[in-house]
Image (cartoon, rainbow, N blue to C red):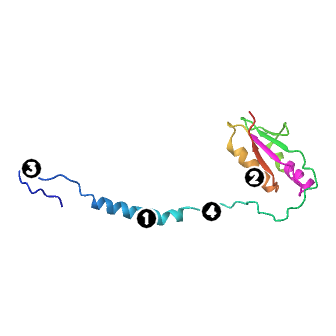
Amino acid sequence: MAFSSNSSSGPMADINVTPLVDVMLVLLIIFMVTAPILSYPIDVNLPQRALNPPPQTQEPPPPIRLRIDASGQVYWNDAPQPLSALPTLMQTEVQRDPTNQPLLEIDTNPDANYEILAKVLAYAKNADMQKIGFVQEQ
């Protein structure tokens, strides 16, 4: 407690910060305990290291250029396609040679709706396309 020994100067006006420090330490402990509970895992399929990679004897097929413009129109190798036709096109490409799939190059306009890109990625996953890349044409 802060009391002045000199009675003529009046009471000393210092703030007692001990309760504030106690409250802050309790909040810190609460946040440290609850922070790991709030996180959730995301499954990511990472490539595994291969000690003896198989030799690549086949020439990879030409990449598929998939473009989404600002209006939401999807172009498959520069040919406009309806969004509902993409699953069939993707499954056809995968069934040609499942071990030697073409690279799917996705180019999206920055003003395009994210929902269309999410549907394209879901179609690619459902068709079991393994090689997907994002490109940005300028």
The mark that comes first in sequence, 2 or 1, is 1
Distance from label 2 to label 4 (Cα)? 20 Å
Nearer the observer: mark 2 or 1; the answer is 1
As for residue 106 lying within the magenta part, the answer is yes
Distance from label 2 to label 3 (Cα)? 76 Å
The mark that comes first in sequence, 1 or 4, is 1
The residue that label 2 is drawn on is 122
Residue at 28% in and 61% down: 18
**Circle 4: residue type:** Pro
Distance from label 2 to label 1 (Cα)? 39 Å
Q: Quadrant of the C terminus?
A: top right
Where are the magenta residues, as a range? 88-107
Nearer the observer: mark 2 or 4; the answer is 4
Q: Are marks 2 and 4 in contact (CB under 8 Å)?
A: no
The mark that comes first in sequence, 2 or 3, is 3
Distance from label 1 to label 4 (Cα)? 22 Å
For the residue pair 34 and 90, the one nearer the viewer reads as 34
The residue that label 1 is drawn on is 30
**Circle 1: residue type:** Ile
Dot 3 alpha-carbon crowd within 10 angstroms: few under 14, some 14 to 19, many 20 or more: few
Which of the 4 quarters of the picture holds residue 15?
bottom left
Distance from label 3 to label 1 (Cα)? 43 Å
The residue that label 3 is drawn on is 9
Report helix, strand or loop for mark 3: loop
Q: Are marks 2 and 3 in contact (CB under 8 Å)?
A: no
The residue that label 4 is drawn on is 41
Relative to residue 56, is residue 68 drawn left or right? Answer: left
Dot 2 alpha-carbon crowd within 10 angstroms: few under 14, some 14 to 19, many 20 or more: few
Residue lying furthest top in this view?
Answer: 138
